Amino acid sequence: MEDLCKIRDVYRAIAEFETQFIQQYNLSLNEGMLLCALLDNPRLTSGEIAEALGLTHSNTSKLIRSVEEKKLIARIIGKVDKRQMYFSLTAEGKEQIHTIKNSNHEMPALLQQVVDMLEK
């Protein structure tokens, strides 16, 4: 039961961080993670995005639509197979993700401990 309480505390810290993240960048954590994924891999399919973020295909479609509406990503039609669709960062998306990466936003102490532990 003690582990469950610890998980609850981590979940609350993530929720607190996401609230601050939305206020500061007008992006959900999933939207921010999508930008990070595309920064690391400049062209991804929706299936690759779903796998990278651990989301269902339905949730990924909604996420892609939301970030497209913010003009942060663009669709690219495959050159060989016109049915193949890729996504990449727009100039605005690149600027946004670099702003996020270079900012010093405050993370709840518990969440920072988890991040530090994962980096070891």
Image (spheres, helix red, strand yellow):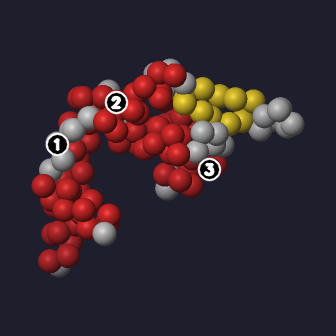
Q: Amino acid at mark 2?
A: Thr
Residue pictured at 57% horizontal, 55% vertical? 51
Q: Earlier in the sequence, mark 3 or mark 2?
A: 3
Residue 94 is at least partly visible in this image? yes
Circle nearer the viewer, 1 or 3: 1
Query: Label 2: how many residues lie within 10 Å, few (<14), some (14-19) or many (20+)?
Result: few
Residues under labels 1 and 3: Cα distance?
Answer: 30 Å
Q: Is residue 7 above or below residue 103?
A: below
Q: Nearer the viewer, residue 10 or 72?
A: 72
Q: Amino acid at mark 1?
A: Glu
98 vs 76, left or right, is left
Secondary structure of the residue carrying numbered label 2: helix
Give x and y (percent) for residue 56.
54, 51
Q: Nearer the viewer, residue 55 or 86?
A: 86
Q: Which residue is mark 3?
A: 48
Give x and y (percent) for residue 52.
53, 53
Residue pictured at 64% horizontal, 39% vertical? 43
Circle nearer the viewer, 1 or 2: 2
89 vs 15, left or right, is right
Give x and y (percent) for residue 11.
23, 57
Residue furthest bottom in the image: 1
Q: Which residue is mark 2?
A: 99
Q: Earlier in the sequence, mark 1 or mark 3?
A: 3
Secondary structure of the residue carrying numbered label 1: loop
Residues under labels 3 and 2: Cα distance?
Answer: 24 Å
The picture quadrant where one finds residue 79 is top right
Q: Amino acid at mark 3?
A: Glu
Q: Which residue is mark 1?
A: 106
Residue pictured at 22% horizontal, 66% vertical? 7
Circle nearer the viewer, 3 or 2: 2
Residue pictured at 58% horizontal, 45% vertical? 41
